[in-house]
Image (cartoon, grey):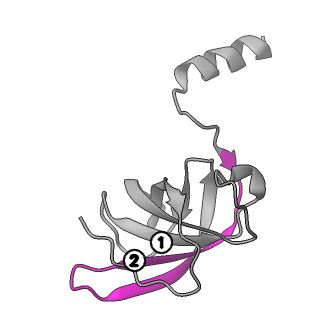
Amino acid sequence: MAVNKLSQRLRTDRRKEVRHTITLPVRVTGCACDEAQWSEPGETINVSSGGMALRLSKKVMIGDILFLEVALPERFQCDTERSKTYKSFARVCYIELHDRQQIVRLQFFRRTIRSKTLEVSVKF
């Protein structure tokens, strides 16, 4: 019975990567429309090798590009050069509200940035 439910769930879930429910601290940096850079701490809700969902108080829009710094376990890192702090740009794919909290779903860009200082200048 449980095997049937699991196999049915796996058939309906078409994600490329498996999501893992894990809470990790994350530093999010972005650039507002007026070109003012902002940064805030957040925490993940779930993580996969392709992206993450996190709680964020700063209002963002779908398509925004954010820079993330997270102590991501190596098993979730796609890079061959793994480090204690995973740094990557990510695109906002989906935004939802739960109990007045903004939940932002992000997709990682496959190329990571390893820099001690970063000016967020990616705009679309």
Q: Which mark is residue 36?
A: none
Could you say which quadrant of the image residue 36 lies in?
A: bottom left
- Give the Cα separation between the discs numbered 2 and 1: 6 Å
Question: Which part of the image, by quadrant, shows the C terminus?
Answer: bottom left
Place of residue 119 in the rendered image (x, y in percent of width and height, measured from the top left) = 41, 84
Q: Nearer the viewer, residue 19 or 79?
A: 79
Q: Nearer the viewer, residue 102 or 113?
A: 113
Amino acid tagged 1? Phe
Amino acid tagged 2? Gly
Could you say which quadrant of the image residue 112 lies in?
A: bottom right
Residue at the image position 62 percent from the left and 48 percent from the top: 49
Place of residue 2 in the rendered image (x, y in percent of width and height, measured from the top left) = 78, 17
Which residue position holds label 1? 67
In the picture as drawn, the residue positioned furthest to the front comes out as: 80
Horizontal side, residue 31 vs residue 49: left or right:
left
Q: Any magenta on residue 27?
A: yes
Question: Magenta stretch: dominant SS?
Answer: strand
Secondary structure under tag 1 reads strand
Q: Nearer the viewer, residue 10 or 70?
A: 70
Q: Which mark is residue 30?
A: 2
Mark 2 or mark 1, earlier in chain: 2
Place of residue 45 in the rendered image (x, y in percent of width and height, measured from the top left) = 62, 57
Say if mark 2 contacts mark 1, CB within 8 Å. Answer: yes
Residue at the image position 55 percent from the left and 33 percent from the top: 16
**Which range is magenta?**
20-41
Vertical arrangement, residue 2 with respect to residue 21, above or below: above
Place of residue 52 in the rendered image (x, y in percent of width and height, measured from the top left) = 56, 55
Horizontal side, residue 40 vs residue 92: left or right:
right
Residue at the image position 47 percent from the left and 71 percent from the top: 67
